[in-house]
Image (cartoon, helix red, strand yellow):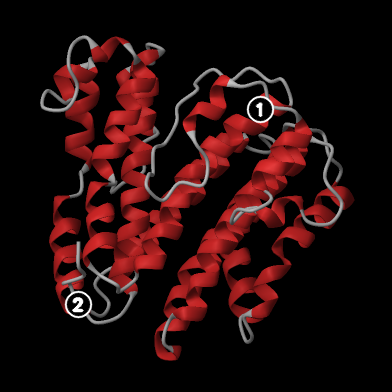
Amino acid sequence: MNPYADKNYLHAKIHALRDQLLKRNDYIKIINAQKPHLAFPALISETDAEDYCKVKEKIFRNQIKKLLLFIESSDYCKDLFKSFLRFFETGNVKLLLAKAFDRTMVIEQWNNISPYNAFDKDLLQRDISLDEFKSLLGNTYLNNVIAGDFPSKYEELESRIDFYAARCFFDFSKEVLFHQRSIFQEVMLRKVVLLKIVWSFRLRQNYGWDDDKISSHLTSLYDFIDEFNGKAELIKKIERQMNKKFHQTSDGIPEVSDIENELERNFWAYIWKNFSRDFHSIHCVISYLWLLYYQIYNLFRIIEGLRFNVSPDIISKKIICEV
């Protein structure tokens, strides 16, 4: 397909798509339907509804179809859209990582971002050693994960995957016109700081790391933001805003999942608020992508909740959207 959509066309389409995003009431209806084929009758058959991985794969593909069309129809932000899809591919990479460490995953769902994928689904059918995993990453956008000393621990590699996927997305800002660059970087700095906070709690609570080890590891992953001059004060401000909710209390430190959910809610509110700041700026593009990310996240959370018979009330409390 020859590119035909310019910047203004794409911004207009994205504003229209924002209005079509699911609201809390829409999510509640999906939850109350109780069965995937009843919630998505035009997409999921009653037979397919029994395979929850297939359900999520079909929903995912349906959710990203507009992005795939944008990539084909416009040169504007094409690389940004491709980089965004890679956030979902990192879930596939983590499945391969689990295989390399001989870990059993409860859900083996593959996010199909073809034709822009770097990893093929047939890899799931193979036994993958740690050396082969390293080789698989070598010529991809995640080659930094294996740069330098190759980590021997699962959690070190998993955290590297998260940070370097964010770095790939962050690096797109170098292609943006200077007056748009600060907008993009401010949004992404918030996401990277969120990652840092979540992983510091995760390494402490789930893997028993001490503070010095956590600080050293995360600093090595976090240092790429130093390339973006003049952002030090903004980073400190964002860290203060996010960290202030999670100081030690009489009830103890909150669970990682609660911390992550709260931080993701705050980030969602920030991008929703800033979506329409300027029709002609990159705000609407980057904001829409993250709003779509959370819509996919919410739908996955609902499907997983239905699969494991979680109560509708608990599922609804995990949804990241308007209050």
Secondary structure at numbered mark 2: loop
Q: Which residue is mark 2?
A: 6
Q: Is residue 290 left or right of residue 11?
A: right
- The kind of residue tagged 2 is Asp
Residue 306 in sight in this render: yes
Nearest to the observer: residue 72 or residue 198: 72
Residue 94 appears at what percent x and percent y? 60, 35
Name the quadrant containing residue 67: bottom left
Q: How many dots with numbers?
A: 2
Residue 85 appears at what percent x and percent y? 41, 51
Residue 31 appears at what percent x and percent y? 25, 24
Q: Is residue 281 above or below residue 1?
A: below
Q: Residue at x 53, y 67 (%)?
A: 170
Q: Residue at x 34, y 29 (%)?
A: 57
- The kind of residue tagged 1 is Ala
Neighbor class of circle 1 (other Cα within 10 Å; few <14, some 14-19, many 20+) is some
Q: Which residue is mark 1?
A: 98
Q: Residue at x 37, y 14 (%)?
A: 307
